[in-house]
Amino acid sequence: MVLATGGAGFVGSHVVVSLLTCGFDVVVLDDFSNSQVEAARRINKLAGGRRAKFVRGDVADLRTLRDLFRTHRFDAVIHFAGLKAVGESVAAPERYYDVNVSGSARLLATMAEHDVSRFVFSSSATVYGLAEKVPIAEDAPLDPTNPYGRTKLIVETLLADVAAARTQTQIVMLRYFNPVGAHPSGMLGEDPIGEPTNLFPLIARSVGLAGQPLRIFGTDYPTPDGTCIRDYIHVQDLADGHIAALSALLSTDLARGVALPINLGNGHGASVRQAVAAFEVASGRTVPTIDAPQRPGDVAASIADPSRAAALLGWRPRRDLDAMCRDMWRFRVLNPQGYRDAAEEHETPRFAPSPPPVLAGAPPTFTDAIRGDTR
């Protein structure tokens, strides 16, 4: 059985579907502060008859964690829960340190109390900061430039200390580059609460009837078209990477006594203008843009070296930028208001869902377990 904290979020929801499809029993702990209950319903619709148990709760609440671990025997934990907006972290660093660092520490302490030793951490390429050399390998200097990135690095440091203290522990830290795309059914995708901050949600918003032009920050970088280059990875490829990491922890001694960092990226990048062009092809719409000055802290290029993932996990990304854009656009068309628009008429017969399942409830000791058809 696997515990997935934050498993109703963008990346987490896709990973949970993959876990269920692969035959794992899954419990999801999520406070739904930056995710939608509708995503939980759809996860269970897509899982081929298997059902995750969803528990509404805060990963930093020790009572919730202890009740959860007393009730279930977990073989591994995948930790997605946390705050992730760079700009927000600059404005409210105390909140980011409290949620991301304290929540992780309490989760790890509870795991230790219950002898759960396998841990997959949702980290980020932001730990590299303004990397001077690309592609970026896992042994590159770590120098994050914002509170969000620093909280990720602090948790990675904590994980290294935990691994040193308890040598039976196996920890993999997956450093994501730039997740994009959606489930091919169009039922799961990225639906940020509040103002989007990532490039592709901003691109998608710009093609709406009330869309705003996309601001391209910097057109004079030393790149072929003058705009920033980033390594974009399909969220389904990320999900495959989590399955590969978990399988390795369950079947080998890959990371025994260490906290092993592994990049998840494509190994090649796309510029902002290339991303816009690919989305225009996928959507058949024009993306209005306006040029803007460079933003402080942005680098010309950030590209992963994913060779460690290939060597240790046998993982390679299989979906290209065009697939990312097609799948993201399908989610956008079928869900013009995101998960807030859950009406069945927005789903074509090809993607028609099965009858709504009943989400399994948690024991009474859990905090506000999700039950029934929550729409």
Image: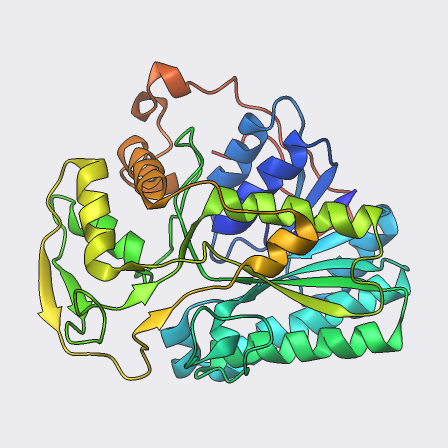
Look at the picture and state if 106 lies above or below 357.
Answer: below
Q: Along the horizontal axis of the image, is 361 left or right of 227?
A: right
Residue 116 at x, y percent in the picture = 85, 57
- Is 115 or 345 nearer to us in this picture? 115
Instruction: Establish if 206 lies above or below 353.
Output: below
Q: Is 288 positioned to the left or the right of 111 in the image?
A: left
Pinpoint residue 155: horizontal percent, then vertical percent.
Answer: 65, 75
Q: Residue at x 30, y 53 (%)?
A: 201
- Examine the image and state in which quarter residue 87 appears: bottom left
Q: Residue at x 73, y 42 (%)?
A: 362
Outermost residue, top direction? 349
- From this viewpoint, is residue 9 visible? no
Q: Nearer the viewer, residue 285 or 187?
A: 285
Q: How many marks?
A: 0
Residue 170: percent from the left, percent from the top?
Answer: 80, 62
> Is 126 above or below relative to 374?
below
Q: Quadrant of residue 101?
A: bottom right
Say how the picture is coloured. Answer: rainbow
Q: Quadrant of the N terminus?
A: top right
Give coordinates of residue 339: x percent, y percent: 39, 40
Task: Say whether residue 317 is left or right of residue 246.
Answer: left
Whether residue 306 is visible to the viewer of this picture, yes or no, is: yes
Q: Residue at x 13, y 49 (%)?
A: 287
